[in-house]
């Protein structure tokens, strides 16, 4: 039993981290968000809602400056104030913003947002347990190896989720009569909008796929749908 105690403690730590992360995320979003009220975007969101046969799509503005979209574990969709400001300044079109909303809806519909929170907590537990085990064989660098391995796993899972959410968004945009061109054009702008320098980072280390791969996947889906 003593041999398994560190692993058991790591699992309990992961469960505690999951609960705490859920609580902290909800509290932060509740305190710093308001419902989006934009008449132009509402027209596009209503078209997407009709395509999904739901009454309406509710989106919130998250009051932070980084350019991003967010699907919360409780199913809510958020656009950051920084992203919305880019739209208001004309750097992002209403159709491109609709593609962001469709993408985040994909994360919710496919269960990614809740699973990511669970994965995050589970990976913390696995990292702790692995660091304890490796530390016995390779002291000092064992925790570093455990962290590196878990980071690679998290990045791979995240990239897979992004491709799936992209495909969901493409299908929804096509069904709503918006099409995928805004989705693809936004991807080409993202690095400039976010100030990211992803080109210097190997694709397998990134949590999001590289832009050319995302666009190629969308076009492959379109070709498949058209052929069918």
Image (cartoon, grey):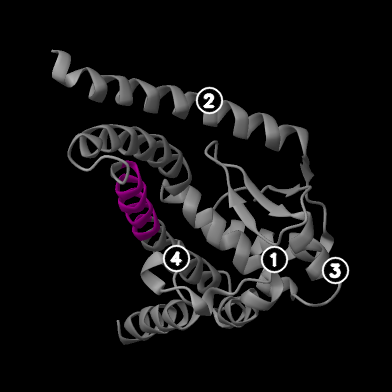
Q: Main secondary structure of the magenta part?
A: helix
Could you tell me if the residues under marks 1 and 2 are in contact, i.e. CB atoms within 8 Å?
A: no
Q: Which residue is mark 1?
A: 44
Could you tell me if the residues under marks 3 and 1 are in contact, i.e. CB atoms within 8 Å?
A: no
Q: Is residue 85 magenta?
A: no
Left or right for 188, reference 66: left
Q: Please report the bounds of the magenta region as a residue range.
A: 143-157
Does label 2 or label 3 sit earlier along the sequence?
A: 2
If the image is split into quadrants, where does the C terminus sit?
bottom left
Where is residue 174 shown, x and y percent of the image?
52, 74
Does label 4 or label 3 sit earlier along the sequence?
A: 3
Residue 9 lies in quadrant: top left
What numbered label is drawn on residue 156?
Answer: none
If the image is split into quadrants, where does the N terminus sit?
top left
Does the image show residue 204? yes
Where is residue 56 shown, x and y percent of the image?
65, 49
What numbered label is drawn on residue 88?
Answer: 3
Does label 4 or label 2 sit earlier along the sequence?
A: 2
Residue drawn 27% across the image and 32% down it = 132
């Amino acid at each position: 039993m003593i041999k398994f105690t560190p692993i058991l403690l790591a699992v309990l730590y992961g469960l505690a981290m999951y609960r705490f992360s859920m609580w902290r995320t909800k509290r932060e979003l509740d305190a710093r968000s308001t419902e989006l009220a934009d008449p132009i975007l509402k027209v596009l969101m209503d078209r997407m809602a009709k395509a999904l046969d739901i009454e309406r799509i509710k989106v919130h503005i998250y009051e932070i400056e980084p350019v991003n979209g967010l699907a919360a574990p409780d199913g809510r969709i958020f656009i950051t104030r920084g992203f919305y400001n880019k739209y208001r300044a004309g750097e992002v079109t209403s159709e491109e913003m609709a593609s962001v909303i469709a993408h985040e809806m994909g994360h919710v519909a496919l269960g990614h947002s809740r699973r990511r929170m669970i994965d995050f907590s589970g990976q913390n537990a696995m990292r702790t347990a692995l660091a304890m085990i490796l530390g016995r064989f390779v002291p000092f660098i064992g925790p570093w190896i455990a962290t590196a391995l878990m980071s690679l796993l998290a990045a791979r899972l995240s990239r897979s989720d992004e491709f799936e959410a992209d495909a969901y968004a493409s299908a929804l945009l096509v069904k709503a009569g918006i099409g995928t061109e805004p989705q693809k054009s936004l991807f080409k702008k993202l690095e400039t909008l976010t100030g990211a320098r992803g080109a210097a980072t190997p694709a397998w280390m990134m949590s999001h796929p590289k832009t050319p791969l995302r666009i190629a996947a969308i076009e492959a889906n379109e070709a498949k749908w058209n052929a069918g």
